[in-house]
Image: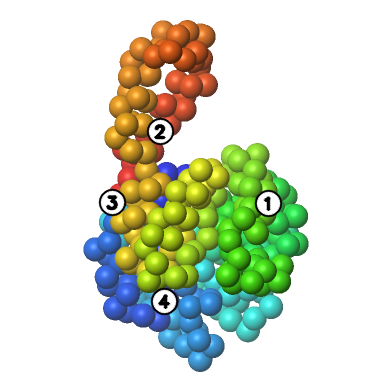
Amino acid sequence: MLLNHARSLLFLPASNARAIAKARSLGCDMVLFDLEDAVPDDKKAEARDGARTAMAEGGFGKRLLALRVNTADTPWHGDDCALARDLAVDYVVLPKAESPADVASVADSTGKPVIAMIESPAAVFAAQAIAATPATAALFVGVNDLRRDLNIPATASRASVSVALQTIVLAARAAGKAVFDGVYNRLDDPDGFEAECREGRMLGFDGKTLIHPNQVDATNRLFAPDAAELDRARRLVEAATGGAERFEGEMIETMHVEAARALLDRAASSVG
């Protein structure tokens, strides 16, 4: 699967063997073995062992695989990067990236493309440079950390970070990179989660990072084109003859045909 076709990207504590086993039966497009925030300090070594065991056992099918390492200012970073270098994961996720140099350092030490997490005001301002660096494969939004650093109350609406969200999307698109929305914490609020997925797609995100298996199906559905969109895309591609022309009451040109084909390709590549 192409990274920019992924919709549902599920974080799992690498120390939780049961959660990892369950992920093999889920329809998520990416499994992210987490060595960072989801793992207590005293279980970091156990988490590395868990990621190593999970990769050795396999069984993840077409899903993309990633390892989130701890930051360079922690005592676990070196061992995490050494593990990432040894494992056949597709990507390394770097939390709290704030410069191209942060990304390049992890890429050099692991030999893997890096997904940079934009989680601070400084990172938002540096997002364009971070996205443009060759080692960066995609951007993740770290909304929780961003809200904390901006002193935004937990009860505030997403409008409070809308400028940051759109800035991150713009940075990714300017560099031709994929970009994914942040996690949703309220596990007992499926309606709120679905509303945030819809909003994320309208903002231009490719998909969403997740923290619970129950969020996977809704994400896949809401970040995928619906039947009406696909039918229209097929009709448009079939009707187009080149250049500017009329289609079902609208003017279309080559860019519309390319967008329709990309939509169809994205739908055809889905895992779940």
Give the residue at mark 4.
14
Q: Nearer the viewer, mark 3 or mark 1?
A: 1
- The reply to whether callout 3 and callout 2 are in contact (CB within 8 Å) is no
Q: Residue at x 55, y 45 (%)?
A: 203
Q: Amino acid at mark 3?
A: Gly
Residue type at mark 4 is: Ala
Q: Using residue 192 as the reference point, say whether residue 214 is left or right of it.
A: left
Image point (67%, 69%), residue name: 152
Q: Is residue 71 visible?
A: yes
Separation of marks 4 and 3 at Cα, in angstroms:
22 Å
Name the residue tied to disc 1: 163
Q: Is residue 265 above or below residue 70?
A: above
Q: Nearer the viewer, residue 21 or 191?
A: 191
**Upstream in the sequence, badge 4 or badge 2?**
4
Labels 4, 2: front one: 2
User: Which quarter of the picture shows residue 121?
Assistant: bottom right
Q: Which residue is mark 3?
A: 272
The spot of residue 225 in percent (x, y) is: 37, 38
Q: Residue 56: x, y in percent? A: 32, 70
The residue positioned 50% from the left and 13% from the top of the image is 251
How far apart are labels 3 and 2 at the CA level? 16 Å
Name which residue type carries label 1.
Answer: Val
Gap in angstroms between the C-alphas marked 1 and 4: 33 Å
- Which of the labelled discs sits on residue 263, or is there none? 2
- Residue type pointed to by label 2: Leu
Q: CA distance from mark 4 to mark 2?
A: 33 Å
